[in-house]
Image (cartoon, rainbow, N blue to C red):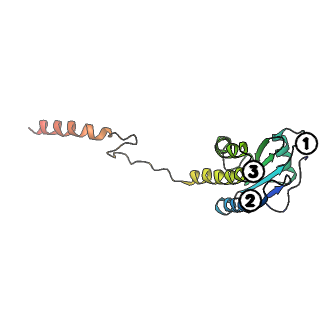
């Protein structure tokens, strides 16, 4: 299929590979949108019609006017290729997107588990977005325990300072 106009929902299954698993995919995509305001559109086609996978995906995203908080995952099941497209200012970095692809999407695709690939993408993006929202805990200066589990220099200096003060008084 050449780059296409997406249907009314988040999933376009022109390859008819989801079957009864379509509801699970819809639920995962809706959860991502509800939790993080990110819309993940997923397209399954048989082939990318001779297009490079990345070009097909970018062109499809462009045709559909996808924006800042939108992502498109496109899978050509016969070609055994996939790609994703996001805005340059998408909330996840290229490294985070690559990690989700390698750790979550690709294992499912290699098993021809199309629904699991879409669900894994939604869950992986959600977890990466949650990790960005977690506060960074910084130890206050003078804390007895350093981040690596050792002790801070203050505990080593204190006996020397007390010893010098006692010597001066004595």
Are discs 3 and 1 less than 8 Å apart at CB? no
Residue 120 as seen in the image, left or right of residue 13? left
The numbered dot on residue 41 is none
The numbered dot on residue 21 is 2
**Rendered residue at 67%/62% (across/down):** 31
Residue 136 as seen in the image, left or right of residue 158? right
**Rendered residue at 67%/63% (across/down):** 34
Q: Which residue is mark 1?
A: 49
> Disc 3 vs disc 1: which is toward the camera?
3
Q: Which residue is mark 3?
A: 114
Residue 157 as seen in the image, left or right of residue 104? left
Q: Residues within 10 Å of mark 2 (few under 14, many from 20)?
A: few
- Give whichever of 164, 122 is nearer the camera: 122
At mark 1, the secondary structure is loop
The quarter of the rendered structure image containing the C terminus is: top left
Are discs 1 and 2 less than 8 Å apart at CB? no
Residue, far left: 170
Q: Earlier in the sequence, mark 3 or mark 1?
A: 1
Q: Residues within 10 Å of mark 3 (few under 14, many from 20)?
A: many
Are discs 2 and 3 less than 8 Å apart at CB? yes
């Amino acid at each position: 299929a050449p780059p296409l106009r997406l249907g009314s929902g988040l999933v376009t299954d022109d390859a008819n590979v989801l079957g009864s698993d379509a509801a699970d995919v819809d639920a995962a995509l809706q959860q991502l949108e509800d939790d993080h305001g990110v819309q993940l559109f997923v397209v399954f086609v048989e082939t990318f019609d001779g297009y490079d996978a990345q070009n097909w995906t970018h062109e499809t995203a462009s045709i559909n006017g996808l924006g800042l908080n939108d992502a498109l995952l496109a899978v050509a099941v016969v070609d055994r290729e996939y790609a994703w497209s996001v805005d340059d200012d998408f909330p996840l970095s290229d490294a985070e997107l690559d990690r989700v692809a390698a750790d979550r999407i690709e294992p499912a695709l290699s098993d021809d588990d199309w629904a699991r690939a879409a669900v894994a993408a939604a869950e992986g993006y959600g977890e990466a977005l949650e990790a960005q929202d977690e506060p960074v805990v910084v130890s206050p200066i003078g804390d007895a325990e350093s981040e690596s589990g050792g002790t801070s220099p203050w505990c080593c200096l204190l006996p020397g300072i007390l010893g010098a003060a006692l010597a001066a008084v004595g």
